[in-house]
Image (cartoon, grey):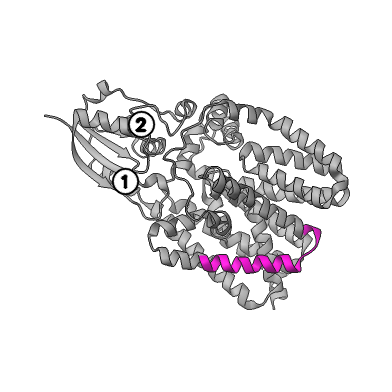
Amino acid sequence: MFRTVTKSKLFFLGLLIIGIAIRIYFIFLRKYPTGDEIWVYYLVKKDFSTIWYSSLSDYHAPFYFLALTFFQKLTHIDLGVISVRMISLVFSIFAVYLIWFLVREKYGRKEAVFAYLLSLFSPVFVWSAIFARYYSMLIVITILSIIFFDKFLRGGNIWYLTGLLFLSVLGIYTHYYFIAAVLAFNLFLILNKRKFFIKLLTFDSLVFVLCFPLLYYFLLLPKADFAGRHINDILKIAGALITNITSWEVLLFSYKAGNYWLLFAYFSVIGALFALILYLFIRKNKDYFSRLVLSMFFVPIGIILFYSYLVKPLFSLSSLLIFAPFTIIILSRVLAKSGKLLAVTVSIIIISSLFILFRSSYTYKSLPDDFKVISKEFQKGDLIIHSHIYTYLMGKYYFGDRANFGITSAFSATIYSEEALGYKLITPEELINTKRVWFLNAPWDLRPEASGAKRVLRENFKETKKSLILSAGRFQENDFEVYLYEGKM
């Protein structure tokens, strides 16, 4: 029965239509975007030079933003958040095809069907498809890289290595984590294919030379202050492993919902189940491609976790989802060879996580709670003062450019990002002539810009309202204290 159904083109087409429909529904459900998405919206409207300096001074790589800007200039289309999400959707569907193609070629039809189902409906792939960032594109680059690397290994063809070089450089210029993929390629060749050692040295040298401008400006330019930024010091291993099945947003929504025992139980089950699946994969798959998949799975996660625990906590463990295709491959291989019980259990986890993603997405249907407080009582002539670059971006996006200001230089960004994102300052002298001032403060942010803004407001105004907003399930930039100050009479 399974074999008969999966031979039908209508079966695959029907699933594809359902997968696309789910993604489009989520895209339009999330009416109010996150700070990261708004960041893209404003940044890609700038010139190439501004994007280059802004990105490299704020721990971002520039290629995706430059590509969107080039697309806008070429087509004269003004990209909004929904438009960029649609671009993510296109890359996501291409990634589904590439995973199906790769797994079918290396393992077989049954495994390819499981890979197709998982990549269409797993929350990590759905989330990357509905988010206005570079994750879907990076997933495509990751899969293409493993395809080119595999073909190079089978014959040593220099053209495949050239293609891998192009993809590796493109990946690094899009996200620094892609360096981990290059290191995984190196480790695999050293352990398994030493005859390609000279070509490996040439490949590494060219990657370094071509990425040198990126590295040079990244090290040269000043960086935003880490202090007060949300760091993934909760559940680091879960953030690195489990979110490649369920997505980072599912993990964060569950964490912020507050039911920690249920969260612990749920993710413990997922972790234990995946540990079993990983054990079965390692024990039963000794071929070189399976070893390659394991290298691409373990090396990036190992590097990032090592750095995060022993050097400095990272605030972007979620970005490891760009290596999620290897989780999909491991799952599809084991499920195809195991009984129905394991497949049903994984299906329950995928469906339940997808439901959590829906609940999280639904919170973006309405204005964030902190900005909702302002919206209800906002009057003509009111100003909104911000202590953080994310509040400024969201305030500017929701309420317009005229009402929103910073009061000190943004320690949460650099001068390059301030310029690129249109961060505007107002002096205390200009501010004191205003009758009513709203102030959004990040309670977890202890940098000088926050304390400086509070001091100016308390010296010149009377505090008449304070609301502590903790929006369950939304990202950390929506946890802001809302103050209303009125002129002293």
The earlier-in-sequence mark between 2 and 1 is 1
Q: Judge whether 420 appears above or below 227 on screen.
A: above
- Could you tell me the amino acid type at mark 2? Glu
- Where residue 194 appears, x then y in whole percent? 85, 47
Residue visible at 61% across and 40% down in the picture: 175
- How many marks do you count on the picture? 2
The numbered mark at residue 370 is: 1
Crowding around mark 2 (Cα neighbors within 10 Å: few <14, some 14 to 19, many 20+) is many
Residue 14 sits in which quadrant?
Answer: bottom right
Residue position for label 2: 449
Report x, y in % for residue 451.
31, 33
**Which of pointers 2 and 1 indicates the residue nearer the eye?**
2
In the rendered structure, which amino acid carries the disc numbered 1? Answer: Asp
Q: Which residues are magenta?
A: 268-289
Quadrant where the N terminus sits is bottom right
Q: Nearer the viewer, residue 271 or 27?
A: 271
Q: For residue 280: magenta?
A: yes
